[in-house]
Image (tube, grey):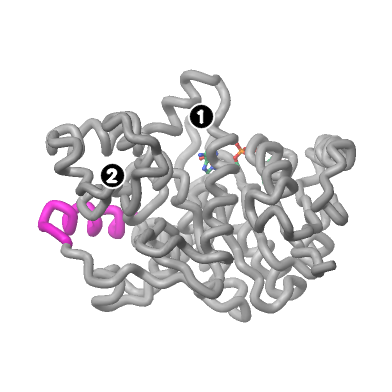
């Protein structure tokens, strides 16, 4: 039988962790025939709860689940890991400054980077979910120089899927008929959900919807603020859809995107024209295709002036976050 893939989930006792672990065990991330070993990490105050999650996973008797490592020791958690999903992070509490949250997360991601670099398997793929996701991923990458830069990514797939969902609702076409939307930039409210190259049932989205004011206004706002809308409705965050989109992100990365289809991923910008002029070294969400376990930015899309402005604005925010993180590290 095939060797199991070792999947690390940090913050595993949290909301997203609780929704994600069972999806991974059902094969939604790596396939219905790929055995896995789950590595679940959380912090000492969550140890009992983490143990409870591990107990439930045992009780679910998943045929694909070949082992569980549930621990509060980051070195133990990272040993022999092939896929690392970084969900744990310091949450932004009411009234907290962005810089305060950033400083907590810089410390966390610096530490976890070293543990991954030392203990993870060569070729380990990393996806960061915890906010500020792009900048946490950048810190992780900088402090784990032995992990190839292209193996560290952040999640914008939920935003991408939200955009697909909105186009589906608006047109009445099933979501499987909608493709090639793009999330540019930061996983924050400055992200730019772009439908200019997307299709619904083989037709350009703009022609199918026929309402540019909606697509440039309400649509963008709805996608950007969907997380807050779900918290308002559920009184809890959007853990189910976040977990589902983590599985989509890793599955497409490992197994490849469908022909003629791309997805959105936060990846380190290689700079230059191939990266649509986005500064080298920013962790920025681009349209990408994946094949053989590698992503490539979709080349040659025509960018209009309006899009250019929005892409640059979200890049500017990322540049500012990067500078803030660097300042905190130097301090
Ligand atoms: P969640 O599982 O709901 O969220 C975890 C992280 O994912 C948060 O940073 C959250 O950002 C981010 N996130 C990204 N996209 C989404 C989305 N669509 N919906 C919701 N969250 C999203 O948080 P919990 O508090 O339930 O769990 C966090 C876990 O992390 C806990 O078990 C805790 O013990 C652990 N933790 C680990 C730390 C460490 O490793 N040192 C430090 C602190 C906590 P946002 O905050 O912006 O919603």
Residue 309 counted in the magenta span: yes
Residue 286 drawn at (x, y percent): 36, 61
Q: Which residue is mark 2?
A: 200
The span shown in magenta is 303-317
Residue 83 drawn at (x, y percent): 67, 63
Q: Which mark is residue 94?
A: 1
Q: CA distance from mark 1 to mark 2?
A: 40 Å
Residue 19 drawn at (x, y percent): 66, 37
Q: Is residue 306 left or right of residue 121?
A: left
Farthest residue, direction left: 305
Disc 1 within 8 angstroms of ligand 1 (CB): no
Q: Is 283 rendered above or below residue 212?
A: below
Of circles 1 and 2, the one toward us is: 2
Q: Tags 1 and 2 in contact by the CB under 8 Å rule? A: no
Secondary-structure class at tag 2: strand
Name the quadrant where ligand 1 sits. Answer: top right
Residue 242 visible, this orientation = yes
Q: Is residue 214 left or right of residue 148?
A: left
Q: Earlier along the polypeptide chain: callout 1 or callout 2?
A: 1
């Amino acid at each position: 039988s095939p060797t199991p893939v070792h999947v690390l989930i940090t913050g595993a006792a949290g909301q997203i962790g609780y929704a994600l672990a069972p999806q991974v065990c059902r094969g939604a991330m790596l396939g219905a025939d790929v055995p896995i070993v789950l590595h679940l990490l959380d912090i000492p105050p969550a140890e009992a709860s983490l143990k409870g999650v591990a107990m439930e996973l045992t009780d679910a008797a998943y045929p694909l689940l070949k082992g569980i490592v549930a621990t509060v020791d980051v070195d133990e958690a990272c040993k022999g890991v092939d896929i690392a999903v970084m969900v744990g992070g310091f949450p932004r509490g009411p009234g907290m400054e962005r810089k305060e949250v950033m400083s907590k997360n810089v410390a966390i991601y610096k530490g976890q980077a070293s543990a991954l670099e030392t203990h993870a398997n060569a070729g380990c793929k990393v996806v960061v979910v915890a906010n500020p996701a792009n900048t946490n991923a950048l810190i992780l990458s900088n402090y784990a120089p032995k992990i190839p830069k292209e193996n560290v990514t952040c999640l914008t797939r939920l935003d991408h899927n939200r955009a697909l969902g909105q186009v589906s609702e608006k047109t009445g076409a099933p979501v499987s008929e909608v493709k090639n939307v793009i999330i540019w930039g930061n996983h924050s409210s400055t992200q730019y959900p772009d439908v200019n190259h997307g299709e619904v049932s083989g037709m350009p989205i703009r022609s199918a919807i026929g309402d540019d004011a909606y697509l440039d206004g309400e649509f963008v706002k709805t996608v950007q603020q969907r997380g807050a809308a779900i918290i308002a409705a559920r009184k809890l965050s959007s853990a189910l859809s976040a977990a589902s989109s983590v599985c989509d992100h890793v599955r497409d990365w490992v197994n490849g995107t469908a022909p003629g289809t791309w997805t959105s991923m936060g990846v380190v910008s290689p700079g230059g024209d191939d990266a649509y002029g986005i500064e080298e070294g920013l962790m920025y969400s681009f349209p990408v295709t994946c094949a053989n376990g590698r992503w490539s930015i979709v080349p040659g899309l025509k960018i209009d002036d309006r899009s250019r402005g929005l892409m640059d604005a979200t890049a500017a925010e990322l540049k500012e976050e990067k500078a803030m993180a660097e300042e905190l590290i130097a301090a």
